[in-house]
Amino acid sequence: MRIKASNSNTPSWRSAYTQVNLPKELLPLEKLSRNLWWVWNNEAMDLFAELDPQLWSQSAHNPVVLLKKLSYERIEEILKDAALLSKVKSVVKNFESYMSKKYDTAKPSVAYFSMEYGFTSVLKIYSGGLGVLAGDYLKEASDSYVDLAGVGFLYRYGYFTQSISPDGQQVANYEPQNFNELPLEPLLNEDGNQMILAVPFHDRDIYANIWKVNVGRISLYLLDTDMELNSEWDRPITHQLYGGDWENRLKQEYLLGIGGILLLNKLGIKKEIYHCNEGHAALINVQRLLDLIEGEGLTFNEALEVVRASGLYTVHTPVPAGHDYFDEGLLGKYMGSYPARLGISWQDFVDMGREHPGSSEKFSMSAFALNTCLEANGVSYLHGIVSRKMFQPIWPGYFHEELHVGHVTNGVHLPTWTAKEMKELYEKTFDKNFYDDQSNHDIWSKIHSVPDEQMWKLRMAMKKRLINYVREQVKEGWIKNQKAPSAIMSVVDQINPDALLVGFGRRFATYKRAHLLFSDLDRLAKLVNNEKYPIQFLYTGKAHPADGAGQGLIKQIVEISRRPEFLGKIIFLENYDMRLAKRLISGVDIWLNTPTRPLEASGTSGEKAVMNGVLNFSVLDGWWYEGYRKDAGWALTDKRTYTNQAYQDQLDAMEIYSTFENDILPLYYARNSKGYSPEWIQYVKNSIANIAPEYTTKRMIDDYIKNFYNPGAKRSNLVTANNYAKAKELAAWKEDTASKWDKFTVDRFTFNGQNIADGSQLTNTHFVDGEKIVVEVVIDKKDMIGDLGVDCVIVEYDAEQQVNKFISSTEFKQVKKEGSKVYFELKTVAKIPGLCNFAYRVFPKHPDMAHRMDFAYVRWI
């Protein structure tokens, strides 16, 4: 018999998982790993790294995974390392001290709703700027002792991971998250099982697991529908951020809004302010209305007074295409039963989501948010102006300059985005307590006392660390794409750590104009191959998988970067996430931003750069419109020269090349005998001293508290006191005024003694500067119970745009009342030179109206 070379049956594999049993000395780290406080505390991150440097790297800096996989042998070594155990005790003590401090009860409590949150690349529930802003805001709320609860989604696949194919195409990879290995925890019922929320949809309940993310002192509650109680159609609702079709998007926004409020109700959480971070969360106000109507017995109009008083809507996009609009039929499928429960008609409900009620427009979540929140804001000064123009049709009796829509310019969380070396410099130069007073310019001005050479060396160290990271990323990416070793080395060898390094990282939407630098390749080639003034560009960013144009831009840039004249001089780094962003914004010399004006709502990456001594070169748009300071960065004008966008792009591209050639590069290379440019360092210090204090989330949250949260909480208390007495009074007044709005009459209307009540034309409208004008109006209110006001509106006609441009409005003085008649008078002088138009409008008045748009009835007379 021949003996076979091998003989084996099929193995019967069995699963086993050994949970690391941390000793009591390390047990506090388990709690610390599940609180994102470690994200913005370098001592905590350094500690986790020191526990096992290789495992920390393999875990992608995830402390939950690190602690789960610590070997028995390594734990034994740690227990024998007195210095390391001392660090453990110190970090845990600092954490416990931080957590022991209570909320500031003088600041209103807040419920905050957002589709995405960016805290760390470990927790993939964000796509870009909106999410990172929300994550920074929650961190700052914790640091600022604000009683805030957040609501969002735990996505199974999150946003996609990006890779670049050999031919330069973006490849979107959706990788499932293992929730058990993330820095969060299941929210448990009293019986010890995970809490499940049942959310009633139109024909069924949809169920969601509830998870909690601890963000310092702040709790963020996340909904997750990927569970067995749901059908195969409903489990994917929370699979992907911004994934699926429009119906899935509506399901998500229904779940965030209706489900979010039901969740807070289930947890017994009531807040003074309800803050919608973008229109995605607008439907929270539907459930809030229902709770008051069905639970408190209020009418719809009474409930609306209460809901609006405590509602705030923050808009983040300056273009209508960036807002969510739903077909009436699709909306009816999910929301059709709600109007009857609210006590209004379907037409009334759907009109609340339209700029022009009664039209056939799609339902706008933004319009609905504006109609159910008393306050709204853009995210920069310029964006506030753009938002007022965009939303003006909702209040047709008013010009956009008069609208109540305000702004709070976005900021960034200083402890998160400032590199360790810079934080150490700030703490040494300013004192550690400066984190509590981040907007104090006097503190930041002390940066000028830091020796120039020290600042240069610090910046160069951060830059070299980035370049080493880039080299590793290039090797990794090119090997993955099976590039020849010679091709890899040709790129790596070309990277020059002494060259001026320019970074560009953002979402690849076409309006961001990532292509602008590549408008003239011959001129660009001369720029990057100038041996006297070497310069390199790092590009990174993702395009939405449905955005073909954005993906085309990525492919174009990748292809250009592989041409011989650009190899190693222009590098595209794949998979832009928070980890890569932090390296970039701290390691480059210049942060470049070239949006189409005025489409950058705010932008925060440049603010992060400022915190690290990186200089900005950007269009004067978004935050840079406010932030730019002479001798602290460079700017392209906010003014358009051409209406033709292609021509404007060409002009801006030439300006970019020229600024690099004539201003930036000569300044950077004005080296002294010690090898650095004192002039460049002066720019860096100016940027830190004069710009950084204004663009932190500390200043941002202080602005929200002062301008929106405090007034909102005060008004909310006003309308809810004494069993909603004021809400009922206001609702009754508005109902009466609305029903009689067309009934009041103008009995007398005189202009400098000439009666024009009968519609006759004025005989004299030519005035000398300073000439006195007296206008008198008598209105008979009939049986209207409320008050009225009259104002004179002056406009200038713009023949080119064929619109009236608002100049001013002046309210009449009420001089007396006789029965139902009210007498108004306006005494003024002619003081506007040139031709202008004027008209008079009547509006409702009440001492407890928040602003004119609170009840925007207007009648022109």
Image (cartoon, rainbow, N blue to C red):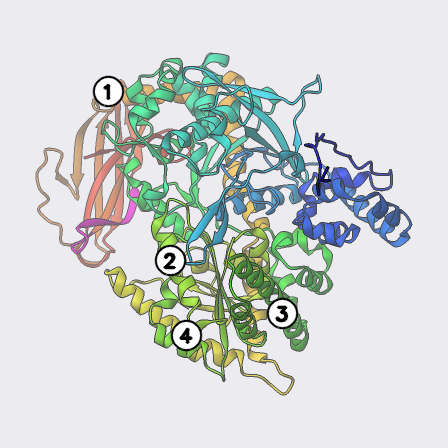
Q: Residue at x 73, y 45 (%)?
A: 66
Task: Name the amino acid type tagged 2.
Answer: Leu
Q: Estimate the spatial distance between the alpha carbons at disc 3 and disc 2, rounded to whole Å.
A: 28 Å
Q: Which is more foreground, mark 2 or mark 1?
A: 2
Element at badge 2?
Answer: helix
- Residue 556 part of the magenta-drawn span: no
The answer to whether residue 847 is visible is no
Q: Nearer the viewer, residue 273 or 260?
A: 260
Q: Quadrant of residue 777?
A: top left
First in residue order: circle 1 vs circle 4: 4
Q: Main secondary structure of the magenta part?
A: strand
Q: Estimate the spatial distance between the alpha carbons at disc 2 and disc 1, rounded to whole Å.
A: 65 Å
First in residue order: circle 3 vs circle 2: 3
Q: Residue at x 62, y 36 (%)?
A: 178
Pointer 1 local density, CA inside 10 Å: few below 14, some 14–19, many at least 20: few
Left or right of 78? Residue 363 is left
